[in-house]
Image (cartoon, rainbow, N blue to C red):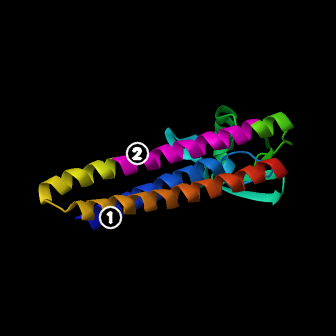
């Protein structure tokens, strides 16, 4: 039972780290990255659909994103969705593809982006700690029901802490890498 609780908590913490990784990937760093527009939803014949499923997104140059919709008749809807998403880039269309030029980041904007990256990482840390807290509470309840020894409960709590520390360390490494990317590109 304790092992199942550990695995469940470990998986949930992994998902929290993955969510933070995805959020950090959407931050603009001055370099073109297809993930910058992954989250944009396009009104595709009345259905909100992710842009990445409707188009090929490529990076032919370090500061240029090219979006080529599979259905050329939807290019206007894609442009509209990009404008609504306010990604800080103006779509330029020739009727077949949309080009997004990634503007140079100012020093002030870089600092804002770093601050936002820290906020995203902190949200991830809080989520991981909440998972640990819930697991600890569940473990204590389980210990009372199953009459587990205090040593077993203590070992399990230490194990939860180790899992938590490992996931928070992974988050911190992601943050450090993103910070370097933002400040040095």
Q: Magenta includes 119?
A: yes
Q: In the figure, 119 relative to 172: above or below?
A: above
Name the mark nearer the viewer: 2 or 1.
1
Residue furthest bottom in the image: 3
The secondary element bearing badge 2 is classed as helix
Q: In the figure, 87 relative to 29: above or below?
A: above
Residue 184 - label: none
Callout 2 touching callout 1 (CB < 8 Å): no
Which percent across, then down, holds residue 20? Answer: 56, 50
161 or 34: nearer the eye? Answer: 161
Residue furthest front in the image: 151
Which percent across, then down, holds residue 87? Answer: 70, 38
The secondary element bearing badge 1 is classed as helix
Tell me the quarter of the picture where residue 77 sits.
top right
Tell me if residue 89 can be seen: no
Q: Which residue is mark 2?
A: 130
Neighbor class of circle 2 (other Cα within 10 Å; few <14, some 14-19, many 20+) is few
Residue in view at x 84 percent, y 52 percent: 184
Tell me the quarter of the picture where residue 139 sits.
bottom left
Residue in view at x 73 percent, y 45 percent: 28
Residue in view at x 47 percent, y 59 percent: 14
In this picture, residue 48 sits left or right of residue 28:
left
96 or 117: nearer the eye? Answer: 117
Which percent across, then down, holds residue 164? Answer: 46, 56
In this picture, residue 135 sits left or right of residue 37:
left
Q: Which residue is mark 1?
A: 155
Neighbor class of circle 1 (other Cα within 10 Å; few <14, some 14-19, many 20+) is few
Q: Main secondary structure of the magenta part?
A: helix
Q: Earlier in the sequence, mark 2 or mark 1?
A: 2
Q: Which residues are magenta?
A: 112-133
Which percent across, then down, holds residue 171? Answer: 58, 54
In this picture, residue 34 sits left or right of residue 185:
left
């Amino acid at each position: 039972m304790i092992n199942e609780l550990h695995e469940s908590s470990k998986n949930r913490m992994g998902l929290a780290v993955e969510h933070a990784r995805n959020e950090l990937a959407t931050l603009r760093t001055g370099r073109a990255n297809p993930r910058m527009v992954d989250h944009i939803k396009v009104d595709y014949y009345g259905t909100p659909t992710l842009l990445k499923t409707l188009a090929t997104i490529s990076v032919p140059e370090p500061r240029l994103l090219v979006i080529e919709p599979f259905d050329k008749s939807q290019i206007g809807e894609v442009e509209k969705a990009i404008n609504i998403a306010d990604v800080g880039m103006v779509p330029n269309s020739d009727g077949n593809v949309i080009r997004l030029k990634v503007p140079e980041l100012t020093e002030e904007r870089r600092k804002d982006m770093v601050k936002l990256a820290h906020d995203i990482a902190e949200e991830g840390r809080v989520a991981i700690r909440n998972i640990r807290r819930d697991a600890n509470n569940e473990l204590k309840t389980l210990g009372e029901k199953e009459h587990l020894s205090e040593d077993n409960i203590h070992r399990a709590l230490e194990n939860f802490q180790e899992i938590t520390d490992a996931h928070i360390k992974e988050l911190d490494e992601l943050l450090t890498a993103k910070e370097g990317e933002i400040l040095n590109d």
